Image (cartoon, rainbow, N blue to C red):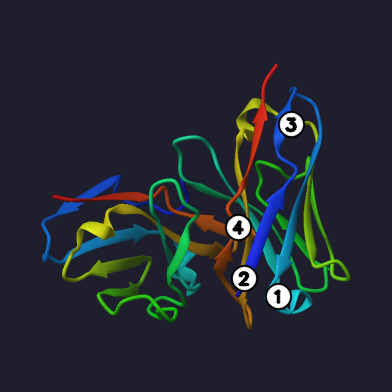
Amino acid sequence: EVQLLESGGGLVHPGGSLRLSCAASGFTFNNYAMDWVRQAPGKGLEWVSAISDSGYSTYFAGSVKGRFTISRDNSKNTLYLHMNRLRAEDTALYYCAKEGGTGSTDLDSWGQGTLVTVSS
Amino acid sequence: QSVLTQPPSVSGAPGQRVTLSCTGTSSNIGADFDVHWYQQLPGTAPKLLIYGNNNRPSGVPDRFSGSKSGTSASLAINGLQAEDEADYYCQSYDTSLSGSVFGGGTKLTVL
């Protein structure tokens, strides 16, 4: 059974930094691209970032480009999201999700999310 | 403003058929990128409902079906049940943004 467990969320001041982690199990981690998707309180889903199975290629939404980086450690089956220069509008529940594979962008497994609150 | 446009709300009575729309542009759905659909029950993480326009993951009832035409896609739910009350999101890839995009979501109410 695929399991994705996010951690690292919390309260941070505007301009601060945070690193989210996503521990994966139940599948061959280094065979799949992975994504981060966020959901602001009471709002819809927003795609944030993706990383290829090897970690060589990374992609970002315009709203976080230049402030967030994504990485993975395939030896530890762990995905990361490094968030810098955080803003109030980054406040959201951050989900880690596994892509379906074979070039498809569908997200077939999701974690339960970790909450990031940016506030002074 | 979401790149993909979904109606904010849809409702139907138990047993009815409802259709949820997702409208894109020539840089996403119209560029022949696949559309995927997710169901989000209150207080839970999203769940993949339809992938690749019209494919159901194992465990998803065949009451749910997807289709795509031109710059739009649709999710149809037959035999509506109370447990279908949830938020539904469409997703595709956008070539001009070089990333995935979601619709704003549709809240389905079962009357």
Mark with earlier residue (4, 1): 1
* Residue annotated with mark 3: A86
- Element at label 3: loop
Mark with earlier residue (2, 1): 1
Q: Is residue A63 above or below residue B25?
A: above
* Foreground tag (3 vs 4): 4
Q: CA distance from mark 2 to mark 1?
A: 6 Å
Q: Chain of mark 2?
A: A
Most foreground residue, A105 or A36: A36
Quadrant of the image occupied by residue B67:
bottom left
Q: CA distance from mark 4 to mark 1?
A: 15 Å
Instruction: Classify residue A22 as left or right of residue A104.
Output: right
Marks 1 and 3 on same chain: yes
Residue B44, position as x, y percentages in the image = 46, 51
Q: Chain of mark 1?
A: A
Residue A49, position as x, y percentages in the image = 68, 55
* Foreground tag (4 vs 1): 4
Tell which residue pokes out farthest to the front in this image: A1
Residue B36 in view, yes or no: no
Mark with earlier residue (3, 2): 3
Marks 2 and 1 on same chain: yes
Amino acid type indicated by mark 3 = Leu
Q: CA distance from mark 1 to mark 3?
A: 28 Å
